Image (cartoon, rainbow, N blue to C red):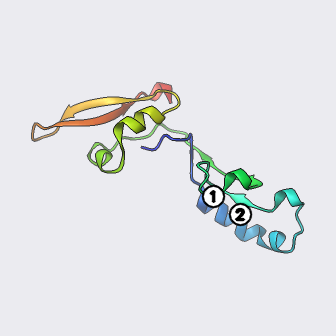
Amino acid sequence: INCHTPAIDASGIVKAVMDELFEYFVEKRLPNKLRSLACCLNMCGAVHCSDVSIHGIHRKPPLVEHDRLLKVCEVPTTIAACPTAAIRPYNFEDDAGEQIKSVQVNNDRC
């Protein structure tokens, strides 16, 4: 689950666009305001100083992989980062009877 922004990193799309537009960027045939391209809304692609930004938008609610969640996410941070409060805590017992902390997604709020 990654709900920090309602978009995905679109580096593959940006690479494809830049492959097609590269000659225009190099030969400076575009106006000055169209000379850089980025893909990440989280500023890793320097979106704040780029002229063109391409991003994808989630169309479906995220699926929760309970067995992987604690290995790759901090549950409180994940819950707090959701802009629509669709992610909430969810505790359950695994097959061995151990209490597992996870999250669940309210699909109607996504």
For residue 92, which quarter of the picture? top left
Q: Please tell me how many numbered marks the rendered image carries.
A: 2
Q: Secondary structure at mark 1?
A: loop
Identify which residue, 17 or 45, lies in the foreground: 45
Q: Which residue is mark 2?
A: 17
Question: Type of residue at label 2?
Answer: Val
The 10 Å Cα crowd at callout 1, few under 14, some 14 to 19, many 20 or more, is some
Question: In the image, residue 43 lies at what x, y percent?
Answer: 61, 52
Q: Is residue 6 left or right of residue 73?
A: right
Q: Residue at x 77, y 54 (%)?
A: 51
Q: Secondary structure at mark 2?
A: helix
Q: Residue at x 56, y 39 (%)?
A: 6
Q: Earlier in the sequence, mark 1 or mark 2?
A: 2
Q: Residue at x 35, y 42 (%)?
A: 74
Q: Which residue is mark 1?
A: 45
The 10 Å Cα crowd at callout 2, few under 14, some 14 to 19, many 20 or more, is few
Question: Type of residue at label 1?
Answer: Gly
Q: Is residue 26 above or below residue 14?
A: below
Q: Is residue 109 above or below residue 19?
A: above
Question: In the image, residue 55 lies at what x, y percent?
Answer: 64, 50
